[in-house]
Image: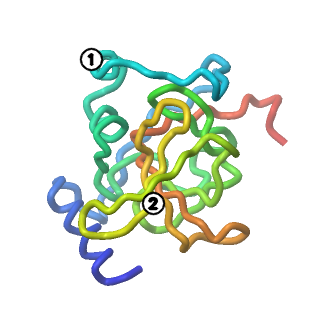
C-alpha cells in the first residue's frame, strides 16, 4: 500500500474517532432467510425521502451520498468470519458477492476479488484528487465502494466495499458442503 494511502486511511479513522487497532464494529447478525428474489430488470428507483425511510442514516450516507465508513470500523472485515453465504445490497437486497470470493485485504473494509456477474456497475471517480473506479449496485445504483487492481488471483481485482452497504445471508445448514 502506498504511504499516502496509508496516511489517508489512518486520518479517516482518526477523524471518525475510531483507532485503527480498535476492534471492528460488530456486523449485523447474519440471516439464513434471503431477501425476496429479485431480477436485475426490476430496477429500484425511489425518491430521496423513500431512501431516507428505508435506510439507516449511515447506510443513507454511503449508499445514496457516496460516503465512506472509516477503515477498520465496519463489520464483515474478517475473512470468512461469517461463514458461507452471500453478501447482498443493503439498499435493495440483490445478491452482489459470495463468501467464496471474499478475502482479507488488510485495508479495513470487506474485500472481494469478483462480484456475482452483472450485479455490480462501474464508473470513473475523480473525487478527492485521485482517479479511481467507483462500484455501485447495478439494480438500485447504491454506492458500494471502489475497485482496485491489487487483488489476489484469479482476477487480480479488489472490490473494496463499505460494510454498511452490505447485508449477509448465511447458507442454510442443508446448503453447506
Graded by Cα atoms within 10 Å as few (under 14), some (14 to 19) or many (20 or more), the crowding at tag 2 reads: some
* Residue at 33%, 18% in the rendered image: 47
Q: Is residue 53 left or right of 89 when viewed as pictured?
A: left
Image location (x, y in percent) of residue 159 = 53, 58
In the displayed structure image, the side of residue 60 where residue 168 appears, left or right: right
Along the viewing direction, whichever of 88 and 49 lies nearer the viewer: 49
Q: Which residue is mark 1?
A: 49
Q: Where does residue 42 sit, x and y in percent of width and height? A: 60, 21
Q: Position of residue 45 (x, y in %)?
A: 44, 22
Using the numbered discs, state the Cα–Cα distance from disc 1 to disc 2 in whole angstroms. 28 Å
Q: Earlier in the sequence, mark 1 or mark 2?
A: 1
Indicate the quadrant where residue 40 lies. top right
Against 66, is 92 above or below?
above
Q: How many marks?
A: 2
Q: Nearer the viewer, residue 112 or 44?
A: 44
Q: Position of residue 174 (x, y in %)?
A: 82, 29
Residue visible at 33% across and 35% down in the picture: 64
In the orientation shown, which residue stands out farthest toward the bottom?
A: 3
For the C terminus, the quadrant is: top right
Mark 2, secondary structure of its residue: strand
Q: What mark, if any, has residue 133 been given in the picture?
A: 2
* Displayed quadrant of residue 165: top left
CB atoms at circles 1 and 2 under 8 Å apart? no
Q: Nearer the viewer, residue 176 or 96?
A: 96
Name the quarter where the N terminus is drawn: bottom left
Q: Is residue 58 left or right of residue 54?
A: left
Q: Looking at the picture, tell me which residue is in the foreground, 36 or 66.
A: 66
Q: What residue is drawn where x is 51% and y is 39%? A: 137
The quadrant where residue 46 appears: top left
Q: Is 124 drawn above or below residue 62 in the view shown?
A: below
Amino acid at each position: 500500500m502506498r504511504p499516502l494511502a496509508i496516511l489517508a486511511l489512518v486520518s479517516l479513522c482518526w477523524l471518525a474517532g475510531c483507532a485503527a487497532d480498535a476492534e471492528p464494529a460488530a456486523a449485523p447478525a447474519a440471516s439464513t432467510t434471503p431477501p425476496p428474489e429479485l431480477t436485475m430488470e426490476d430496477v429500484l428507483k425511489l425518491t430521496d425521502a423513500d431512501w431516507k425511510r428505508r435506510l439507516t442514516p449511515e447506510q443513507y450516507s454511503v449508499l445514496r451520498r457516496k460516503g465512506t465508513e472509516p477503515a477498520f470500523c465496519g463489520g464483515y472485515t474478517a475473512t470468512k468470519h461469517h461463514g458461507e453465504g452471500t453478501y447482498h445490497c443493503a439498499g435493495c437486497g440483490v445478491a452482489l458477492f459470495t463468501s467464496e470470493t471474499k478475502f482479507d485485504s488488510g485495508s479495513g473494509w470487506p474485500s472481494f476479488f469478483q462480484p456475482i456477474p452483472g450485479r455490480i456497475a462501474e464508473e470513473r471517480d475523480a473525487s478527492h484528487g485521485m482517479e479511481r473506479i467507483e462500484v455501485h449496485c447495478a439494480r438500485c445504483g447504491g454506492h458500494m465502494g471502489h475497485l482496485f487492481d491489487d487483488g489476489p488471483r484469479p482476477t487480480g481485482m479488489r472490490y473494496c466495499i463499505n460494510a454498511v452497504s452490505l447485508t449477509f445471508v448465511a447458507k442454510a445448514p442443508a446448503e453447506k458442503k
